[in-house]
Image: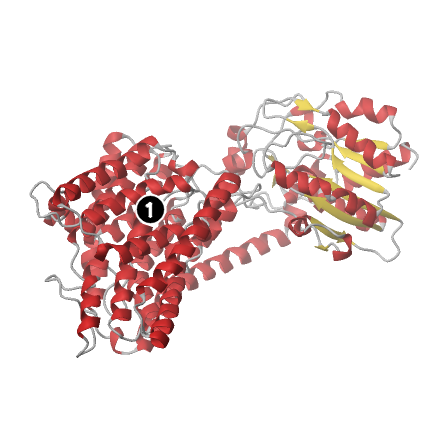
């Protein structure tokens, strides 16, 4: 499967404040500026003319870039850097368009620009999103539907990049087999945000020009230079530390737009010999094509290495019209290439969902040579058709252009066509789920079938719970910990007051990673039953061992652990609950000396430690394998685990230390060592290592019994 969360996308060109969003229609085919200077101002007219002219070679550049993106996706299973070229081109043409207005002394009409831009971009996106949502409903695994439905809404509202950014660094995000058919909308979201931001910079230049009467070019150059430097520095730093997030981060991409704007400001003053233009054009093309082959784009961008494709595209644009039969511009201006450039937006929109849907239906990680050719051909034909019957007619549709409220109406209709059905769909599913869960005590008893013989017989045809979809649902930590605790800002989210009782007999602190977090629903029931206060301080992926190497997020985990002293000082827990051992996908189990040292840290401060033995983990997700069908349980059965029935590594430590109590629940998770995906009509595992909250809750009474018995045995 192609990388599910860092796919580059083609982005449409921006629209001119007065014409279509395609950059090639900002000026007439004869090269005369459509944004003309005010009458009687020859100097202004001359300045406007510098930034005008038809650029067919850039239209062809769009075609080459989209072909690179499509070919790399379909045949090579990697990304090409083409998205960066489109970000660059969009800013290039947006800048030319606004500078013509500024230098011509014409009003910027920013409100109309924004309305016009999104009126032109949204209709085709709406058609593709609705079609993709239909495919998701019809063909995609049930566990992915809710997540992809949300991403459809995120795409039409231009925040898909942030959705993917947070998913990319979310420890609890589900690792499903299918990539999102909407993930290619991330760069469209970035562009949509820049389409809102960039005109404000032009507005600043307009204010300066109005006050001083000077050309706006120096002011714009200074502004975009500052954006370029600041964003590039931020991009390099964030790529080095949080590349998964930085890839989708608008702030780390602004410099690419700024570079396009700077080139647009400089290009009227660049005069190069024909021979140099020939070399620049072909050299830029070879360089741009080679980026995806030589560089791990998805792992290295958007840091400084992204200058490679951008400078390659800049070379092609600077080469411009060489006037030579051997020039690259001769090829880029060829009618078929120009035609493909016209359909570039549509081609990018359709090729990715077609590819992902094919891989989902055929259950394949990549497309083969023949199927790949079919996908490319179908994508091109569908793009040409959509351009002809949707995009071009809407470009020529004059009714919305007459009034701003009509433009706003078109935008509202497009948004409503996606948001309303998606929200309605979500509501229907939520209602169905609530009805199922209202009968869960009778129909989905979970672990209680292993301990009680007199259970009321439920509906044998009742659906399984829970529905496995999206990321692992993190149990709530409760209300925020008090600010007086003094935690660092980044650690506030990991601390919560889970149970608060004015007459509590004991105070419990839950500390650890996601394998401690997963027990919170049951521990909360235990605390409420025993009238205990309970605070939770947990962060996914962080081991609690003193100076224990972390799997990832080492700096963040170190910061989290540093604040543990503050939590202990504030809470003064009588009982500290941790996840003691750590299971492995190979079926083994470890107990690190660093974890034991941390236990002593707790006991030395006067706390009783309750260490819960880790549950088995596997190399696949049994619950996802089920696809909601209990009859598939036999096909989704993991290998028998060796953990159940074997001595707990914690046992020896607990035997020596009365202040350490071990609790083992694995006989209820994997009875007799067999980890059935379904017990008591509840799905046991959410993914390959986390127990579902539903099944955890079904073990509450047994956990209470074992915790209190263990504490009593240890004299607590």
Q: Quadrant of the C terminus?
A: top right
The picture places residue 447, in percent across and down from the top left corner, at 69, 38
In this figure, what is the number of numbered marks? 1
Q: Residue at x 19, y 54 (%)?
A: 342
Residue 66 shows in the view: no
Relative to residue 318, is residue 212 drawn left or right?
right
Q: How is the image coloured?
A: secondary structure
Position of residue 80 relative to residue 204, above or below, is above
In this rendered view, identify the residue nearer to me: 661 or 644: 661
The picture places residue 708, in percent across and down from the top left corner, at 85, 39
The picture places residue 580, in percent across and down from the top left corner, at 74, 31
Q: Residue at x 17, y 73 (%)?
A: 42
Relative to residue 712, is residue 223 drawn left or right?
left
Q: In which quarter of the image is residue 541?
A: top right
Q: Tell me the element at label 1.
A: helix
Residue 489 shows in the view: yes
In this rendered view, identify the residue nearer to me: 79 or 630: 79
Q: Residue at x 26, y 53 (%)?
A: 345
Position of residue 199 relative to residue 315, above or below, is below
Residue farthest toward the right in the current orientation of the protein: 715
Q: Quadrant of the N terminus?
A: top left
The picture places residue 276, in percent across and down from the top left corner, at 17, 42
Q: Residues within 10 Å of mark 1 (few under 14, many from 20)?
A: many
Q: Residue at x 64, y 28 (%)?
A: 616
Position of residue 99 relative to residue 445, above or below, is below
Query: Mark 1 = which residue?
Result: 83
In this rendered view, identify the residue nearer to me: 353 or 14: 14
Position of residue 66 relative to residue 608, above or below, is below
């Amino acid at each position: 499967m192609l990388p599910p969360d860092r796919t580059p996308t083609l982005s449409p060109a921006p629209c001119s404040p007065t014409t279509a969003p395609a950059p090639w229609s900002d000026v007439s085919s004869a090269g005369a500026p459509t944004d003309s200077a005010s009458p009687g101002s020859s100097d202004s007219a001359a300045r406007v003319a510098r930034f005008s002219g038809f650029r067919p070679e850039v239209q062809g550049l769009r075609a080459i870039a989209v072909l690179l993106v499509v070919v790399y996706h379909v045949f090579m299973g990697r990304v090409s850097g083409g998205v960066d070229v489109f970000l660059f081109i969009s800013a290039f043409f947006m800048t030319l368009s606004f500078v013509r207005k500024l230098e011509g002394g014409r009003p910027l009409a920013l409100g109309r620009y924004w309305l016009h831009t999104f009126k032109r971009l949204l209709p085709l996106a709406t058609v593709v999103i609705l079609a993709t949502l239909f495919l998701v409903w019809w063909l995609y695994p049930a566990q992915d539907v809710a997540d992809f439905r949300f991403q459809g809404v995120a795409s039409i509202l231009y925040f898909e990049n942030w959705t993917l950014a947070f998913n990319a660094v979310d420890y609890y995000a589900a690792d499903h087999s299918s990539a999102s058919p909407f993930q290619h909308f991330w760069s469209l979201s970035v562009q949509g945000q820049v389409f809102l931001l960039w005109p404000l910079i032009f507005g600043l230049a307009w204010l300066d020009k109005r006050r001083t009467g000077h050309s706006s070019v120096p002011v714009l150059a200074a502004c975009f230079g500052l954006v370029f430097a600041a964003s590039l520095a931020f991009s390099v730093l964030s790529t080095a530390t949080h590349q998964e997030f930085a890839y989708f981060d608008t702030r780390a991409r602004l410099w690419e737009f700024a570079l396009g704007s700077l080139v647009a400001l400089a290009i009227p003053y660049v005069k190069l010999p024909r021979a140099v233009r020939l070399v620049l054009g072909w050299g830029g093309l070879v360089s741009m094509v080679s980026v995806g082959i030589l560089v791990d784009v998805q792992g290295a961008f958007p840091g400084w290495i992204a200058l490679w494709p951008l400078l390659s595209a800049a070379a092609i644009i600077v080469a411009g019209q060489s006037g030579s039969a051997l020039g690259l511009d001769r090829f880029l201006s060829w009618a078929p290439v120009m035609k493909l450039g016209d359909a570039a937006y549509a081609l990018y929109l359709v090729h990715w969902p077609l590819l992902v849907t094919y891989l989902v239906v055929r259950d394949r990680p990549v497309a083969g040579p023949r199927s790949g050719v079919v996908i490319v051909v179908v994508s091109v034909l569908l793009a040409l058709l959509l351009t002809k019957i949707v995009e071009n007619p809407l470009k020529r549709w004059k009714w919305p252009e007459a009034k701003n409220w009509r433009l706003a109406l078109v935008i509202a209709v497009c948004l409503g066509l996606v948001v309303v059905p998606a929200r309605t769909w979500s509501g229907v599913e939520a209602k169905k789920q609530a009805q199922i869960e209202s009968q869960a005590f009778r129909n989905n008893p979970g672990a209680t079938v292993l301990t009680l013989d007199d259970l009321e017989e439920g509906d044998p045809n009742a659906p399984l719970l829970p529905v496995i979809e999206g990321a692992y649902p993190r149990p709530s930590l409760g209300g925020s910990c008090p600010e007086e605790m003094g935690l660092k800002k980044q650690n506030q989210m990991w601390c919560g007051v889970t149970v608060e009782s004015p007459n509590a007999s004991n105070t419990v602190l839950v500390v650890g990673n996601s394998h401690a977090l997963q027990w919170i629903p049951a521990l909360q029931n235990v605390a409420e039953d025993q009238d205990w206060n309970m605070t939770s301080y947990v962060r996914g992926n962080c081991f609690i061992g003193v100076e224990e190497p972390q799997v990832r997020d080492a700096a963040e985990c170190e910061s989290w652990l540093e604040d543990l002293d503050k939590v202990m000082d504030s809470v003064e827990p009588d009982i500290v609950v941790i996840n003691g051992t750590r299971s492995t996908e190979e079926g083994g189990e470890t107990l690190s000396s660093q974890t034991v040292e941390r236990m002593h840290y707790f006991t030395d401060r006067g706390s009783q430690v309750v260490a819960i033995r880790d549950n088995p983990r596997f190399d696949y997700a049994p619950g996802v394998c089920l696809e909601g069908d209990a009859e598939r349980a036999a096909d989704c059965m993991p290998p028998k685990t060796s953990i159940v029935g074997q001595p707990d590594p914690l046992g020896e430590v607990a035997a020596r230390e009365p202040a350490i109590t071990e609790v083992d629940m694995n006989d209820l998770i994997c009875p007799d060592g067999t980890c059935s995906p379904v017990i008591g009509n509840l799905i046991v595992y959410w993914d390959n290592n986390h127990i579902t909250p539903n099944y955890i809750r079904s073990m509450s009474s047994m956990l209470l019994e074992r915790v209190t018995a263990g504490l009593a045995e240890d004299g607590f």
